[in-house]
Every structure is written in structure tokens, then in C-alpha cells.
Image (cartoon, rainbow, N blue to C red):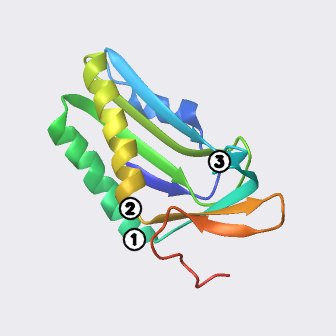
């Protein structure tokens, strides 16, 4: 399952979704909002996504992980909207019979999601400036 959420992510609930009696391992990744980026003081950020394509591409990534690694289940949830410093921005969880596959698939999912899913991040800085980061063409339709 790949999902976008405008509400806080609940890791405990997501781990419960992954539980499987065949699982011997669960690897998770949490991406948090940090207070600095590229030497600038960050006060907050927001994420925007192109929902239909983001969901489709996210599900494609999870399907690829299932084909590439001997895993049981994989989940990824990414926040949208405004987040404060320390907020949970993205969560990935993978279960497998063995830890190696769980770790490898978890890393694959987050790396591919960051590279391919149309989610854009805008940072708000302490000096009052704001900027879209890590995007080739900023989504300027909402200034």
C-alpha cells in the first residue's frame, strides 16, 4: 500500500498492518523534518503532490520491491501539507522472512519514492524566505 496523508502518520498502526506470522523481520524508515538544509535555518515545510500519479507511481515502486526482493509486505505513506520541525514526513515499512530482504527492500522503496514520486517540498526559512527544493520545475501554481 502506498498512500498520501494530510494527517499525521501513525507508525504503530502501520506496523500492525504489516504483521504476518511468516515474518521474521520488519525494517522501517522514518523521514523527519530537520531544522537545517544546505546551511539554512528551516522553520517549517510543506509537501504538495500530484495525487493520482503519486499513488500510481508509489504502487508501482512497491510492486517492483515485491518482485526484486523476497518480502511479504511493503507500505509507504508520505505526508502532504504543512509540517513542523521534527514532524514525520514519510514512513516505509517492509516485512520479510529474513532481515536482509527487509532492509534491502525498505531502502529501495524510500530511494525510489524520493526519485520518482511527484511530491514537491517547499521550505520556509528563518529569514522569511521560502523555496521549493530538490525539484526540476517548481509547482508555481500555488505561490
- The reply to whether dot 1 and dot 2 touch (C-beta < 8 Å) is yes
| Mark 1–mark 3 distance (CA, rounded to whole Å) | 20 Å
Task: Give how far apart the Cα atoms at labels 1 and 2 are.
Answer: 5 Å
Q: Residue furthest right?
A: 127
Answer few, some or many: residues within 10 Å of disc 1's Cα (few below 14, many 20 plus, some between 14 and 19).
few
In the image, is residue 9 above or below residue 79?
above
N-terminal-most mark, 2 or 3: 3
Q: Nearer the viewer, residue 40 or 114?
A: 40
Residue farthest bottom in this picture = 141
* Between 11 and 139, the one nearer to me in the picture: 139
Residue 137's spot in the image, x, y percent? 47, 76
Question: Label 3: which residue?
Answer: 8
Name the residue located 65 percent from the left edge and 50 percent from the top edge. Answer: 37
Q: Would you identify the image quadrant in which residue 45 lies?
A: bottom right
Q: Secondary structure at mark 1?
A: helix
Image coordinates of residue 43 in percent, x first then y, are: 78, 53
Taking the image as shown, residue 83 lies to the left or right of residue 6, namely right
In the picture of the structure, the residue carrying the numbered disc 1 is 52
Secondary element at tag 2: helix
6 lies left or right of 60? right
Image quarter of residue 79? bottom right
Crowdedness near tag 3: few (<14), some (14–19) or many (≥20) residues, C-alpha within 10 Å: some
Rendering coords of residue 101 (x, y %): 25, 25
Residue 55: mark: 2
Q: Position of residue 77 (x, y in %)?
A: 48, 48
User: Badge 2: few (under 14), some or many (20 or more) residues near its Cα, within 10 Å?
Assistant: some
Q: Element type at marker 3?
A: loop
Residue 82 appears anywhere in the view: no
Residue located 39% across and 60% down the image: 117
What residue do we see at 45% from left, 69% from top?
Answer: 51
Residue 120 visible in the shown view: yes
Amino acid at each position: 500500500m502506498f498512500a498520501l496523508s494530510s494527517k499525521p502518520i501513525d507508525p504503530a498502526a502501520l506496523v500492525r498492518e504489516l504483521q504476518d506470522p511468516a515474518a521474521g523481520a520488519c525494517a522501517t524508515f522514518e523521514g523527519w523534518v530537520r531544522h537545517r538544509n544546505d546551511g539554512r535555518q528551516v522553520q517549517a515545510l510543506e509537501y504538495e503532490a500530484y495525487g493520482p500519479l503519486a499513488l500510481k507511481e508509489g504502487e508501482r515502486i512497491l510492486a517492483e520491491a515485491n518482485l526484486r526482493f523476497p518480502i511479504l509486505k511493503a507500505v509507504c505513506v508520505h505526508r502532504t501539507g504543512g509540517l513542523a520541525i521534527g514532524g514525520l514526513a514519510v514512513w516505509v515499512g517492509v516485512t520479510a522472512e529474513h532481515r536482509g530482504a527487509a532492509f534491502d527492500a525498505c531502502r529501495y522503496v524510500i530511494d525510489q519514492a524520493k526519485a520518482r514520486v511527484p511530491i514537491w517540498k517547499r521550505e520556509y526559512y528563518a529569514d522569511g524566505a521560502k523555496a521549493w527544493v530538490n525539484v526540476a520545475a517548481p509547482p508555481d501554481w500555488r505561490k
